[in-house]
Amino acid sequence: MSKKILLLGGAGYIGSHTAVELLNAGYEVVVVDNYSNSCEESLHRVEKITGKKLAGIYEANVCDKEALEKVFSEHKIDACIQFAGLKAVGESVQKPIEYYRNNIDSTLTLIETMKKFNVNNIIFSSSATVYGEENKVPYTEEMHRGRCTNPYGWTKFMLEQILQDAAFANKDLAVVLLRYFNPIGAHESGLIGEDPQGIPNNLMPYISQVAVGKREKLTIFGNDYPTPDGTCRRDYIHVVDLAKGHVKACDYIFGMKGVEIFNLGTGTPYSVTEIVTTFERVNNLKLNYVYGPRRAGDLAESYANSDKALKVLGWKTEKTLEDMCRDSWNWQKKNPNGYRK
Ligand code: NAD
Ligand code: UDP
């Protein structure tokens, strides 16, 4: 019988792409989301892409214990993927308590509910941000984590610790911490993609909105970094490759106990200028952009060593930067206002 995976925050950008890949791989999928940064439409599109039905869709806050217990009593869950969380770095500096409350509380409530229903497998969305400022690139999983530069990053740092402590105390628990690098791109159908509310913080949605005419110009934050062209370098990963990493993690988690940590990145960094010029080239358009001052808290370089995910999970990325730029634009062009009409 196929295994049932519960996606908390499954209507969001990474969750919806993961739902597609899990359904395609033969898993059953249940989603809980409060739609604080998404909407149910993404889930209908997941069903459209796959031609399969989700086993359950619940509008609920993951911090709401009773609501979660209802989900666990209605479905026999085999593993949970905890995507639910607030993720805007700048906003987390302005509203730290909201970030700690939502991100920490939701995960604690989930772990407690899992324990009550004897569910012992959890995959957690962590981030490359936990490597902090001290470590040298490329990052490997066994490095000591560094100091985070904002409350959002600290929630990931703390939740990694909380999950490791939980696994130490409960030997039945299996925890997979996935440290994502910079997900961009969209499903090639153009039916699901990233749908930021308000002014985008991240590079690719900002570029797409400039291209579609919603923003006047892109500002490249700093061109005096110690990198080949002076702009920051990041490990951009196609969201579909990232989603497939979750399928591999699900396949793996049923045969393990304790904690495993995996970087999910390509291992190849690209600069901001390279992203801009590739986007222009593959989509045959011109972007209005200027060079501006550095953004506070940005590192010159961040990229993964992803050998462990290949060796242990048998996962590696398949999509190119060209694919990422083409698919981001395809989604933006077909959905200029995201999921809203
Ligand atoms: P997203 O905002 O699109 O998805 C998160 C989802 O969680 C949203 O649908 C939101 O409505 C939901 N949510 C938030 N709080 C909730 C709560 N209390 N109860 C129920 N639902 C709740 O973000 P994403 O880009 O898909 O990111 C998913 C996870 O991956 C997040 O934890 C994020 O921090 C992490 N992550 C993202 C990136 C990135 O660049 N996108 C990088 C590293 C890590
Ligand atoms: N960036 C930029 N202009 C923007 C947004 C981002 O130059 O409007 C740069 C940013 O300085 C970083 C890279 O793009 O070097 C990726 O930023 P993003 O916020 O997408 O991800 P981060 O790596 O900061 O999590």
Image (tube, rainbow, N blue to C red):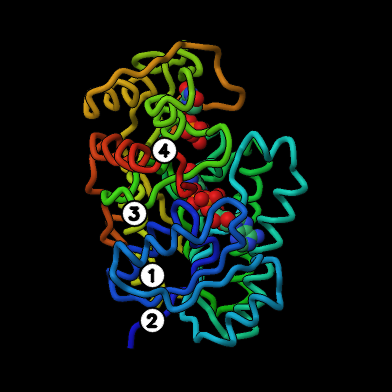
Q: Position of residue 148 (x, y in %)?
A: 62, 38
Q: Is residue 250 above or below residue 89?
A: below
Number of other residues with Cα within 10 Å of mark 1, as a class: few under 14, some 14 to 19, many 20 or more: many
Which of the marked residues, 2 or 3, is nearer the chain's N terminus? Answer: 2
Q: Nearer the viewer, mark 1 or mark 4?
A: 4
Amino acid type for the residue under numbered disc 3: Lys
User: Could you tell whether 127 is left or right of 190 in the image?
Assistant: right
Q: Nearer the viewer, mark 4 or mark 2?
A: 4
The disc placed on residue 250 is 1
- The residue positioned farthest toward the right in the image shown: 97
Say which residue label 2 marks.
3
Dots 1 and 3: beta carbons under 8 Å? no
Q: Helix, strand, or loop for circle 1?
A: helix
The disc placed on residue 308 is 3
Q: Position of residue 22 (x, y in %)?
A: 34, 68
Which of the marked residues, 1 or 3, is nearer the chain's N terminus? Answer: 1
